[in-house]
Image (spheres, rainbow, N blue to C red):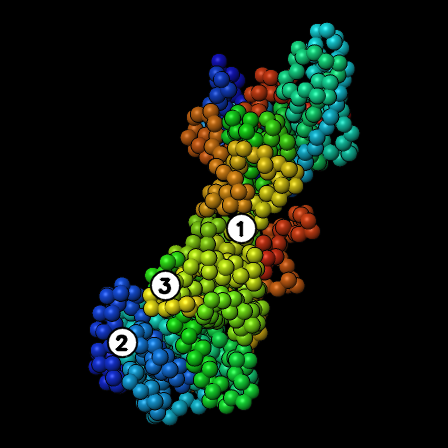
Amino acid sequence: MASEPIVAVEIGTSKVCALVGEAREDGHIMVTGIGHCSSCGVRKGVVMDLEKAGACVRTAIQGAEQSGQVEIGKVFLVISGEHIRSMTSQGSTPVMDVKAGVTQDDMAQVMDIARAINLPHDRELLHSIPRKYMVDDQLVVSNPEGMRGAKLSLDMLIVHGARNVLTNAVQAVRNVGLDVMDVAFSGLCAAMAVLTPEQKECGVALLDLGAGTTSYLVYAGGAIALAGVLAVGGDHITNDISIGFSVSLKRAEMLKQEAGSVIPDSSMHFQRLSIPAEVGFPACSVAASDLSTVVQARMDETLQLMAELFKKQGLIHQLGAGVVLTGGGVHLKGVLPMAEQVFDLPCVIGMPVNYSGMAMASDGPEYAVPLGMLRYAVRSGAYHQTERTGWGGLFGKLWGRS
Amino acid sequence: MNTSDKVDPQEFTRFRGGAAPQAASAKRATRLNLPRALVVGLGNGGCKTVTAMGRQWKDGPRVVAINTDGRSLAEAGDLAGLHIGERVIKGLGTGGEPRMGRRAAESDIEAIRGLFRDVDVVFLVVCLGGGTGTGAAPLVVEEARKAGALTLVFASLPFEFEGKRRMELAQRGLMALQSSADAVMCLPNQRLFELVEDRANIAAAFQKTDDMLARGLQAVWCVISRRGVINLDFEDVSALVQKGNGHCVFACAEGTGPDKVKQVLEAVRHHALLNHGVVLAEAEAFLVTVMGGSDLSLKEVDQLMAGIAKIGRAEALMMTGVCCESDWQDRLFVVFLVAEKKGADGLTFIASQRDDEPGGGLISAAPGEEPIPEPVSRVKIKQVGLFDKVSQGRFKDVEATVVDGNNLDIPTFKRRGIMIQKILRNHAG
């Protein structure tokens, strides 16, 4: 079943990426085109400059059109940034026909009720994800259809974001002449790309170590329990290096990529990393151990913040499958052992599951987010009822109202 | 300056005693499979220390005394000695001028270089503040490093009564050493005051310095050379020194009899060199070497380490080594190497001053004279205080990420008060 090509766009802090994919059997996704462009006008996952970001999107889309041999008019857009928060919401409704048990209609009804929360006027609902159903306040089930009871309650996770930030991101894409079909939270996308059903069942935390932000999504008790974004990412490491050693951001980035390590390796003592001279900058060198100290401090803090958050939410003991790391940040040397130490849990690097084509894209953890967006798009099309987004009619909500 | 005169290092013309020290050392080293080490005492203080050490430490590494003053070398007894700068100084002292010390070393650089052939580790003992030690030490260290040896410097800082000038010279010397040596252990003499009785004469006070330096050196040598039950090596020492950015102090404590563990812990808590345990309590990292007899029990080590861990900070990095001496009985000797918290007394940095002074610094030469060359890589140590002006770099124009009152856009290392070294090549030559 070769479907229509789907296009996912991520306006990241370091790169803008467009992927073209096709849905195959059993949820398999074939990547047929890829285009990317280093990012401008984006800070901490938020579009700051519509024009620059739009130009990057155009370049990325052109690349994807060329490599995928398609014409792109509609895209699915990934949303990130610290403005994204999650909360739980509950709703309950009497079961209409007690004898027949819970029906699809009841479920739809309770979902609408749970979703009908009053967000502040500057917030916009991104996702509403059913976590668990309760029948007569007792039985906790994931699918209550056909169950007998008088009352059906639903526990839902609401993911919401700042309206102006969302609007800006969408506008940047629209300015290039593309239609945005739907938007999705980057953490959710990453989870869809790399997490296996077993991991979700056991409880798992996903950390997407991006350039501008660190997105997180936690599955506990078989459902999403927490989602959000910490606006600290790889850019901060670069910035720290730049400030610490008084080097330009470009050189700091180079140092990070070439020698960035979070392990103060004893063999690196007294080793100096030299930076060649270039126009406007003399050659200089930094101590490798100091470099790793700076990187280590930042990474440690970021992971500690995450660990503290999970502890505060009482989730840390529910993570049977440990922590999965994705995003460009996993390329830092030693980040995995460090995460294991901080979380005291098994940690793995999340590789996209069930994707093929375009070796570069389907292998790398840094493409987890746009790859997940493809899957999200496929699912929201196919199972519109069960995996509703609330943004299913993005324009109906966002644009229709205005 | 006359440096063209060839001095054949093989001849060791200025050496007395220790006819073939290298051969002997090599033999010993292969037998025990130890790193080939050389202890160098530099300047008056350094020579005295190594002399004292050589006497009480029979099976230690090879010892060489280097000085500009021939008389002090004569006092060194049967130690190997190297008289430097004869042509420059003509047998007189340096007059407390580091510049002269440096010149002296430069004039005999070939002989100094010859010392470091086939040596793995060089311990340099120097009492900073004078002419020879302060001026020549960076050069000696550089030569040793060029020869491929690891360099560990034991430096004492002068007593306060010796005057401000000496202290300043010493601080500058210390900085130069920290930038060139692999590791610098520092002993601020002022802390020794408490160890010396009120009525002790000045000679006794200096004797104490010598003893302390000797013990510290012995301790580090033990750490490196002995194959302990729990082993530590030079890398651990360097890791420690890195942690303290070159600020390291050492202390020893001993206990005998049934309550030896208690004695040691008590001694640590009141140790003058550890500033009554404060240094240990605030340390970022410390290294503990436990030496005991063959009767040392696991329980004793456990008690000791638990006690030490209680004194130190919970998050401090603690490295432990344990070794047993077969001929000891009921005796416990514990050596502490502590990476001191920055800004502790007597160790304040004067880095900024140095760059600001346009040749007016005490170490820089008078106009017309050649300045003392800086070490190859010039190290600027950046100390970041809590109240420093904070920069956010590329995040200055976006909304700050604030979690629990912390602005996360400010580099973590700054907020955590971690010091790093900013290294720039010195192009001026």
As measured in the structure, the alpha-carbon distance from the residue carrying label 2 to the one carrying label 3 is: 41 Å
From the image, tell me which residue sits under label 3.
B294
From the image, tell me which residue sits under label 1.
A238
Q: Residues within 10 Å of mark 1 (few under 14, many from 20)?
A: many
Q: Is residue A349 left or right of residue B396?
A: left
Q: Is residue A109 left or right of residue B6?
A: right
Which residue corresponds to the image point at 46% horizontal and 35% vertical from the top-left? A364
Chain identifier of the residue bearing label 2 in the image: B
Q: Residues within 10 Å of mark 3 (few under 14, many from 20)?
A: some
Q: Position of residue A172 (x, y in %)?
A: 63, 34
Chain identifier of the residue bearing label 3 in the image: B
From the image, tell me which residue sits under label 2.
B114
Which residue corresponds to the image point at 62% horizontal and 41% vertical from the top-left? A311
Q: Nearer the viewer, mark 2 or mark 3?
A: 3
- Which three-letter amino acid code belongs to the residue tagged 3? Ser
- Which three-letter amino acid code belongs to the residue tagged 2? Gly
Q: Identify the secondary structure beneath mark 1.
A: helix
Q: Nearer the viewer, mark 2 or mark 1?
A: 2
Q: In the rendered view, would you say A306 is above or below B160?
A: above
Cβ atoms under marks 2 and 3 closer than 8 Å: no
Q: Identify the secondary structure beneath mark 2.
A: helix
- Residue B335: quarter of image: bottom left
